[in-house]
Amino acid sequence: MNTNHEQKNRSVYVVVTRTGTNVARAIRVFSRMPYSHVSLSADASLHQLYSFCRNYKPIPLPATFNTEIIGEGTLGKFDTIPCEIYEIRLTEEQYAHFQLIINYFCDHRKQYSYSILGLIMVKLQIKRNLERKFVCSQFVAHVLKECGVTLEKPPCLYSPDDLRYLPDAKLIYRGELNRYYRDLHENELSYSPLMMNHAV
């Protein structure tokens, strides 16, 4: 029986990707892992992705917190972008907190920067928090922890590959990012388990 006291659930989405930039290729060689980048989205339509990445498409630096749009910027340079998309269920309260965190980063993005040293620390699993500096995976892990999602180690130690194995993460799509986005929006579909099962 439904009651007013039942907790409603929302979801956020972890999107791991592999692009063909020189930096992405170098990260994959350095990390020996299949994906070099990870972002967060507030909904399965992936209208906007949030991460730490380059500010300008032609050059890797400067880089900081940015909103990514599929088909634009670095994500618009490549026809084929292998990806995996994971759903993480949140309570309404957790989801509201997620939105507050993202809004904070949007409003204060100039105070943050990409952590080149963080790439080395993640690889070597050195636990050290650098003030106002993140790599993409550290940022995603930080936001999830602040929302109450279970992590198995400190956010500063997470790689994009680690985020594929979060206890609360459910794989809903494995394939090509542009195709996912195009099929979703051309058919004017919202998230449905049937469509995701077909896409995997």
Image: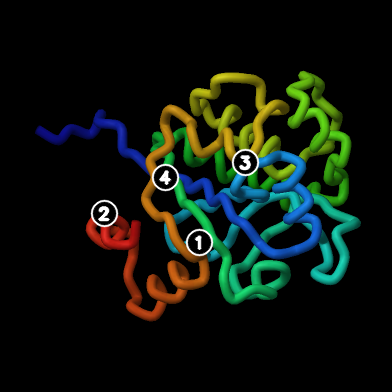
Q: Residue at 58% x, 61% y: name it.
A: 48
Q: State the SS at label 2.
A: helix
Spatial distance from mark 2 to mark 1, Cα to Cα?
16 Å
Picture quadrant of residue 2: top left
Q: State the SS at label 1.
A: loop
Tell me, yes or no, if residue 107 can be seen here: no
Q: Which residue is mark 4?
A: 87
**Closer to the camera, 179 or 50?**
179
Spatial distance from mark 3 to mark 1, Cα to Cα?
18 Å
Q: Position of residue 9 (x, y in %)?
A: 34, 39
Q: Position of residue 137 (x, y in %)?
A: 67, 40
Query: Which one is earlier in the sequence, the residue at label 2 or at label 3?
Result: 3
Q: State the SS at label 4.
A: strand
**Closer to the camera, 101 or 152?**
152
Q: In the picture, which quadrant includes the N terminus?
A: top left
Q: What amino acid does circle 2 point to?
A: Pro
Q: Position of residue 94 (x, y in %)?
A: 48, 34
**Closer to the camera, 18 or 109?**
18
Q: What amino acid does circle 1 point to?
A: Leu
Query: Which one is earlier in the sequence, the residue at label 2 or at label 1?
Result: 1
Q: Which residue is mark 2?
A: 193
Q: Is residue 67 above or below residue 79?
A: above
Q: Position of residue 81 (x, y in %)?
A: 57, 65
Q: Which residue is mark 1?
A: 46
